[in-house]
């Protein structure tokens, strides 16, 4: 699939630069690139990630619909209702787009709200569009449209799967004037562009060689081969895990320790989401577990404290959860799930996700080695042909993911190759490199 990219620097046609919207499985990220220095009002032309009014560098990719279907919340308000005991349904925008029938209004509301906030924050204006706001945000000529619109080139990234792309284009058309001014860029292509712009790709490797992108998102991972020159994705393999999988598994671990057999999971062994009869308690466990997984990216041990989690049925006194969690505990839970659920499922898929030249994976390291080898076999590229292997996405900040991908690359091509060509952006850049790169394509 080819990425849509203008032949010239399209940002020169827009007085206020370029804005990229990266709709991920868990987070929506936005970046802005000022006009080129040669343009009126131009500056450094280096992109930066926007920060919302609450100081966050992302918006949760969530749409929540009330029990009766009359109320729709998006972003952080939707996240607060994830485990609401009053009911309702929370959906991921990419899932809604792939379904293509219902929920499109919620996806547009999420994009419109986040983009409006970002535009007003960077370029001025009150940005208060309200729930019923309509009309374009991104325009070529502000004088021809009026209202709260900006002469900003919009770029939308999308995953390697084409499912939902037509619906995504339709929604973008409602945010732009004229409707065809938006560009759509494949997420792995955007990641390579960002790494190239920031000088992260090794100079010693073949300059025109392909780049393999391992994008570990919130709920999914994609392993893609991007052709030299950066405009085309030659192959992509989806894997059913992401950073949120670690949170799910930690929640399940804490529930089993605290409630005994009070936790349950779906019939599908690949489903890591635990359930609990007390939605409020489950919500608090998720909040604490997400914070713990984040802390364990930098520490080997952390504490999880959730006071007044439940009531003892015999003494009628409150029970408090206070537990120390080691990084190794979460890693063991994940490795067990990879061995018993993920690896067998990938082997059953029949789409060549795993290499036939390697045994069935037993952990994340051997699984990634098999997936990377299969991707190389499918494109007929040898390891030496690749300019780099680029590890990105919010989930790539988890130590087990970084270690496992490094071990996989070393297993296939050697330690020296791993040191020279495995590129792992640090900190926030790991999950922001794609949205930054989208503005320079």
Image: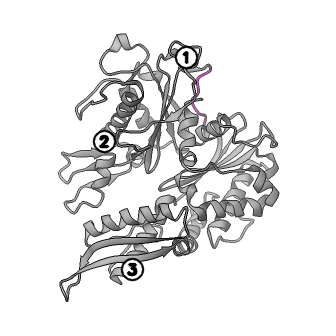
Identify the residue at the far top of this view: 143
Percent coordinates x, y for residue 315 in the rendering = 19, 88
Q: Please say whether residue 4 is one of the residues in the magenta stretch.
A: yes
Few, some or many C-alpha atoms within 10 Å of disc 1 (few <14, some 14-19, many ≥20)?
many
* Picture disc at residue 106: 2
Quarter of the figure with residue 291 = bottom left
Residue 256 tag number: 3
Percent x, y of residue 174: 35, 27
Spatial CA distance of label 2 from label 3 is 35 Å
Q: Residues within 10 Å of mark 2 (few under 14, many from 20)?
A: many
Left/right placement of residue 417 relative to residue 328 reads: right
- Residue range (magenta): 1-7
The x, y position of residue 383, in whole percent, is: 79, 52
Looking at the image, the residue that sits furthest to the bottom is 314
Asked if residue 104 is positioned above or below residue 378 in the image, the reply reads: above
Give yes or no for contact between labels 2 and 3 (Cβ–Cβ under 8 Å): no
Cα separation between marks 1 and 2: 32 Å
Q: Nearer the viewer, residue 340 or 205?
A: 205
On screen, residue 291 versus residue 89, left or right, reads right
| Count of marks overlaid on the render | 3
Depth check, mark 2 against mark 3: the one in front is 3
Q: Say few, some or many: other residues with alpha carbon within 10 Å of mark 3 (under 14 / 14 to 19 / 20 or more).
A: some
The correct choice, above or below, for 74 with respect to 124 in the image is: below
Residue 104 sits inside the magenta stretch: no
Q: Residue 159: tell me if it is visible.
A: yes
Q: Earlier in the sequence, mark 2 or mark 3?
A: 2
Question: How far is the residue under mark 3 from the one under mark 1?
Answer: 57 Å
Residue indicated by mark 1: 12
Q: Determine the secondary structure under disc 2.
A: helix
Magenta stretch, main secondary structure, is: loop
């Amino acid at each position: 699939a080819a990425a849509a990219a203008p032949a010239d620097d399209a940002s020169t046609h827009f007085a206020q630069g370029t804005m990229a919207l990266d709709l991920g499985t868990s987070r929506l990220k936005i970046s802005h690139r000022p006009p080129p220095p040669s343009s009126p009002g131009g500056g450094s032309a280096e992109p930066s990630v926007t920060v919302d009014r609450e100081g966050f560098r992302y918006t949760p990719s969530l749409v929540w619909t009330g029990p009766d279907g009359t109320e729709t919340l998006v972003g952080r308000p939707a996240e607060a209702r994830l485990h609401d005991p009053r009911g309702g349904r929370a959906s991921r925008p990419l899932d809604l787009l792939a379904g293509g029938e219902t929920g499109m209004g919620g996806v547009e509301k999420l994009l419109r709200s986040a983009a409006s906030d970002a535009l007003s924050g960077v370029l001025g204006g009150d940005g208060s569009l309200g729930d019923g706001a309509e009309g374009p945000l991104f325009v070529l000529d502000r004088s021809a449209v009026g209202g709260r619109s900006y002469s900003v080139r919009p770029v939308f990234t999308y995953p390697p799967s084409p499912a939902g792309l037509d619906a995504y284009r339709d929604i973008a058309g409602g945010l732009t004037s004229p409707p065809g001014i938006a560009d759509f860029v494949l997420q792995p292509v955007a990641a390579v562009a960002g790494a190239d712009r920031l000088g992260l790709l090794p100079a010693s490797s073949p300059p025109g060689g392909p780049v393999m992108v391992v994008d570990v998102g919130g709920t999914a991972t994609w392993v893609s081969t991007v052709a030299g020159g950066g405009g085309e994705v030659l192959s992509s393999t989806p894997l059913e895990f992401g950073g949120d999988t670690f949170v799910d598994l930690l929640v399940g671990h804490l529930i089993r320790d605290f409630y005994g057999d009070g936790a349950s999971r779906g019939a599908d062994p690949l489903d890591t989401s635990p359930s609990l009869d007390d939605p409020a308690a489950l919500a608090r466990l998720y909040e604490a577990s997400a914070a713990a997984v984040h802390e364990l990216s930098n520490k080997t041990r952390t504490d999880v404290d959730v006071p007044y989690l439940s009531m003892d049925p015999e003494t009628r006194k409150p029970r408090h959860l206070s537990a120390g969690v080691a990084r190794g505990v979460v890693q063991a839970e994940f490795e067990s799930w990879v061995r018993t659920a993920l690896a067998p499922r990938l082997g059953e898929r029949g789409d060549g996700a795993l290499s036939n030249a390697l045994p069935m994976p037993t952990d994340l390291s051997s699984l990634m080695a098999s997936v990377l080898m299969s991707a190389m076999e499918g494109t007929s590229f040898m390891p030496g042909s690749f300019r780099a292997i680029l590890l990105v996405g919010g989930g790539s900040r988890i130590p087990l993911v970084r270690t496992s991908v490094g071990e996989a690359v070393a297993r296939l091509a050697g330690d020296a190759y791993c040191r020279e060509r495995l590129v792992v952006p640090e900190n926030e850049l790991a999950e922001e490199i794609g949205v930054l790169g989208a503005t320079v394509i």
